[in-house]
Amino acid sequence: METKIVTLAAFHVVGYRIEATVEEFEAGLRQSHYDKLIEKKNEIKHRKNDQVLLMQLYPSHEDFDAKVDPFTHLLCYEVNNTEGVPPDMIIHHMPARSYVTCTHRGIETEIGDTYDDIYGQWLDDAGHVPECYDFEILDERYQPESVDNEIEVYVALQS
């Protein structure tokens, strides 16, 4: 797995917020909200591009377990301006931050292995501490059921 550290400027996203466990999210909430977001993308004024972001915001308590505890999922688009947001969508601000990033290659159901590599091995080896969120960029390479699928993964790092 090839990783690099990047620093991103602050940015805003607009889309849907879902509170759920991983299992609940994967059991249908993800696909239904993804489809709805794609269907309504032209209603999002000032959309920066067509890349869908899947953000995962985790509680900061020590005993949090993403497999059993609910947390916040955002399916969204980055925007240049937060005016004119559709009434059923939210605005979320992302601060300027450094991230470790890599490309997950392969079917989407195996992306947990990529996260395990980052959170389990890479962070320890590199001496970094994760912040309480990460995100994925789903662009033109996103083919969830294909071995040719590619998803950019970003894990926020504490300053």
Image: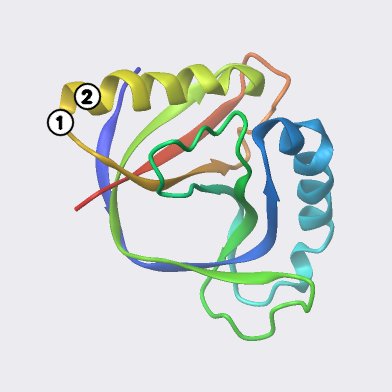
Residue at the extreme bottom: 83
CA–CA distance between discs 1 and 2? 5 Å
Q: x, y (%) of residue 15?
A: 67, 63
Q: What's under tag 1, amino acid-wise?
A: Gly
- The residue under label 1 is 127
Q: x, y (%) of residue 128?
A: 20, 36
The residue sitting at 44% across, 28% down in the picture is 103
Q: CB of mark 1 within 8 Å of CB of mark 2? A: yes
Q: Nearer the viewer, residue 68 or 122?
A: 68
Residue at disc 2, secondary structure = helix
The residue sitting at 47% across, 49% down in the picture is 59
The residue sitting at 17% across, 27% down in the picture is 126
User: Residue 80, relative to residue 130: is it above or below?
Assistant: below
Q: Hey, which quadrant is residue 67 in on the image? A: top right
Q: Quadrant of the N terminus?
A: top left
Q: x, y (%) of residue 155?
A: 38, 40
Q: Residues within 10 Å of mark 2 (few under 14, many from 20)?
A: few
The residue sitting at 55% across, 27% down in the picture is 150
- The residue under label 2 is 124
